[in-house]
């Protein structure tokens, strides 16, 4: 049983970057390149295994931005560079970047939802000729929750980046309000050439999708990434099933024309 | 193939001969262990003699635990930092005494564990590849059975079929390994297993296209499910007793006899029981119990058929037998079929 798909492989933590007090980005040694939007099952022996999406990757490594919210992630947060996590994957279908060539891409992300689309943005800004335009709308709960501050600043050279927070704090001079509120202000020279990605908490996704449809986009022009509980990642455990669809196999990225049929 | 009449001693000699090659599972009545005072439970256990097998009653729980233990070691993480396969394997196959519906149930489990996704489940596959079925003929249909409606009353997928009569066992032996253990001098006879051809309970399965149309028109939000929100107590007995339900959750725990080693186990999980959809950050789906009933029923009669081509129900009726609130799956499906015809 050397090819047992449940056996994780060791991955050394190469680097840890603190994004916020509860969100750290881990650079993990990994020989193969995933696709943007795919995920891994990440293990901390003794604490368990959790599906975590790839936020970026490069030669010999993948990066994951992880929020300390549960048993496994708490176990990851006490690790230091040089220590190991255990991973299997990548799993699922990522974003169809090849379909975005020549299109005007709009990304609407809420909170940690920015993580699974970060590698899409970084690839698009590094090769901006492939897109007709790039809008990044991102919302966080508060200024303290902002992820990827340096990257957000750097992306502005190639993309229209708008950042808003649900509630401001002392010293915050940027926009305040939910990210959904930015959608009606978008301007496209050719609506039919737009493709959009929406990722974030369920409520944020619901209203962002409604706002994009209200702007005249079709469901086929919108992609979403779904997060669900999983124990296996390979279509056996049943936790992530919605209707006849397994999020681990057919997702986590779905075209909204398909995703709108998925009702938990 | 041979058809033989075996004395109890001869049959026990066969079982004894097979024990070396197979773990033999059969329904066993455990006196006084039922859910009510002084009641029995009939569930699957390893046996080595005919007298242990409960032939007359329907088992309360399905035979799936012969291949999918309720709690199963998957991997060990050793103090040396290695993940190793932890599933016990003594090299023996599995011989399961079971009824026609339960053979069909294993075919449903196969679709998930062997066929869904790019890779087969290694532990299920290893056991399943060495599994042989012994068909127990149903002398009659039992309470709540609706196998005929589900097309699962008959099967040809068995290595041996048996009928217990007074003082002997009639057997149709097809498998070469099993034939080799038939004691010399066993008398040939005429025996072909008979199948139940009618149940008291019948089920009208809704047409898939009609269900699809109804879902698009809001079936999931229909008041139809509210009854179950009030009646279901989310105990999960329906899914635990089901021969087709296949979900599991993995957990890590220190190995009992070696706490320095981590054991990753999987345990049965149920879409009716709390925490099935819980995610980091406190998100969850299907909080109300009516939506859990809807999810299970739709999985059985619509989602699974759409994906795998047939219902994920064989009509054994155990979910109806087990429900402490007397919720009937078959009745729910019939009411749903009526609703679809009347309102959609």
Image (tube, rainbow, N blue to C red):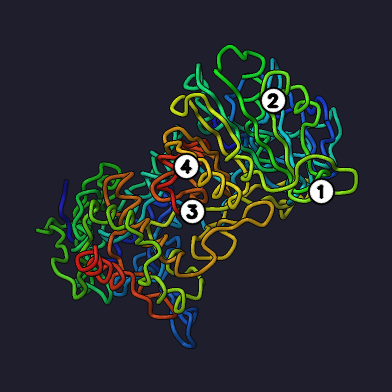
Residue B340 falls left or right of residue A197: left
Q: How packed is label 3: few (under 14 Cα within 10 Å), some, or many (20 or more)?
A: many
Q: Chain of mark 2?
A: A
Q: Nearer the viewer, mark 4 or mark 3?
A: 4
Mark 1 or mark 2: name the one nearer the start of the chain.
Answer: 2
Marks 4 and 2 share the same chain: yes
Along the viewing direction, whichever of B117 and A200 lies nearer the viewer: A200
Mark 4 or mark 1: name the one nearer the start of the chain.
Answer: 1
Q: What residue did someone put label 2 on?
A: A62
Of the numbered discs in the image, which one, if any, rests on residue B194? none
**Tags 4 and 1 touching, CB below 8 Å:** no
Q: How packed is label 2: few (under 14 Cα within 10 Å), some, or many (20 or more)?
A: many
Q: What residue did someone put label 3 on?
A: B247
At x 16%, y 63%, the residue is B195
At x 51%, y 40%, the residue is A212
* Residue A202, position as x, y percentages in the image: 58, 50
Mark 4 or mark 2: name the one nearer the start of the chain.
Answer: 2
Q: What residue did someone put label 1 on?
A: A168
Q: Nearer the viewer, mark 1 or mark 3?
A: 1
Q: What residue did someone put label 4 on?
A: A213
At x 39%, y 70%, the residue is B225
Along the viewing direction, whichever of B6 and B206 lies nearer the viewer: B206
Q: Answer whether residue B259 is visible to the viewer in this image.
A: yes
Q: Chain of mark 4?
A: A
């Amino acid at each position: 049983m050397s090819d047992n798909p449940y056996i994780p492989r060791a991955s050394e933590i190469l680097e840890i970057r603190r994004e916020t007090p509860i969100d750290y980005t881990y650079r993990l040694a990994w020989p193969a390149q995933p696709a943007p939007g795919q995920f891994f099952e990440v293990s901390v022996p003794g604490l368990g295994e959790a599906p975590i999406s790839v936020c970026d990757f490069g030669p010999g490594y993948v990066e994951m931005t992880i929020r300390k919210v549960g048993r496994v992630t708490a176990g990851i947060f006490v690790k230091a560079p040089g220590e190991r996590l255990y991973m299997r994957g990548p799993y699922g279908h990522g974003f169809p970047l090849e379909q975005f060539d020549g299109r005007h891409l709009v990304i609407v992300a809420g909170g940690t939802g920015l993580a699974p689309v970060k590698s899409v943005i970084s690839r698009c800004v590094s090769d901006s000729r492939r897109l007709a335009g790039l809008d990044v709308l991102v919302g966080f709960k508060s200024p303290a929750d902002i992820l990827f501050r340096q990257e957000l600043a750097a992306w502005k050279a190639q993309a229209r980046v708008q950042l808003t927070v649900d509630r401001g704090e002392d010293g915050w001079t940027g926009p305040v309000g939910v990210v959904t509120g930015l959608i009606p202000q978008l301007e496209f020279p050719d609506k039919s050439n737009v493709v959009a990605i929406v990722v974030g908490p369920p409520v944020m996704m619901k209203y962002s999708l409604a706002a994009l449809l209200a702007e005249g986009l079709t469901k086929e022009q919108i992609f979403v990434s779904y997060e669900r509980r999983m124990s296996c990642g390979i279509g056996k455990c049943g936790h992530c099933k919605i209707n006849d669809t397994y999020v681990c196999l057919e997702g986590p990225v779905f075209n909204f024309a398909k995703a709108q049929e998925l009702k938990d | 193939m041979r058809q033989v009449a075996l004395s109890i001693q001869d049959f026990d000699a066969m079982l004894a001969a097979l024990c070396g090659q197979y773990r033999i599972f059969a329904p066993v009545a455990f006196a006084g262990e039922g859910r009510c005072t002084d009641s029995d439970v009939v569930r699957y256990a390893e046996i080595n003699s005919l007298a242990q097998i409960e032939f007359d009653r329907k088992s309360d729980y399905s035979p799936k635990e012969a291949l999918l233990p309720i709690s199963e070691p998957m991997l060990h993480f050793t103090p040396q930092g290695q993940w190793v396969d932890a599933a016990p394997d003594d090299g023996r196959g599995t011989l399961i005494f079971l009824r026609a519906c339960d053979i069909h149930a294993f075919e449903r489990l196969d679709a998930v564990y062997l066929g869904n996704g790019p890779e087969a489940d290694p532990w299920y596959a290893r056991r399943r590849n060495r599994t042989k079925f012994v068909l127990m003929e149903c002398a009659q249909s039992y309470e709540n059975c609706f196998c005929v409606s589900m097309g699962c009353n008959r099967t040809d997928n068995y290595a041996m079929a048996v009928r217990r009569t007074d003082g002997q066992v009639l057997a149709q032996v097809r498998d070469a390994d099993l034939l080799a253990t038939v004691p010399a001098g066993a008398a040939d006879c005429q025996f072909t297993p008979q199948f139940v051809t009618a149940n008291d309970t019948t089920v009208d399965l809704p047409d898939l296209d009609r269900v699809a149309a109804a879902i698009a028109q809001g079936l999931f939000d229909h008041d139809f499910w509210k009854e179950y929100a009030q009646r279901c107590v989310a105990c999960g007995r329906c899914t635990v007793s089901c021969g087709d339900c296949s979900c599991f959750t993995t957990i890590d725990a220190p190995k009992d006899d070696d706490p320095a080693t981590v054991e990753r186990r999987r345990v049965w999980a149920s879409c009716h029981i709390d925490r099935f959809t819980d995610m980091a950050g406190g998100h969850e789906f299907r909080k109300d119990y009516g939506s859990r009933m809807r999810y299970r029923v739709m999985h059985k009669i619509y989602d699974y058929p759409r994906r795998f081509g047939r219902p994920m129900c064989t009509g054994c009726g155990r979910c109806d037998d087990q429900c402490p609130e007397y919720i009937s799956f078959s009745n729910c499906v019939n009411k749903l079929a009526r609703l679809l015809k009347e309102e959609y």
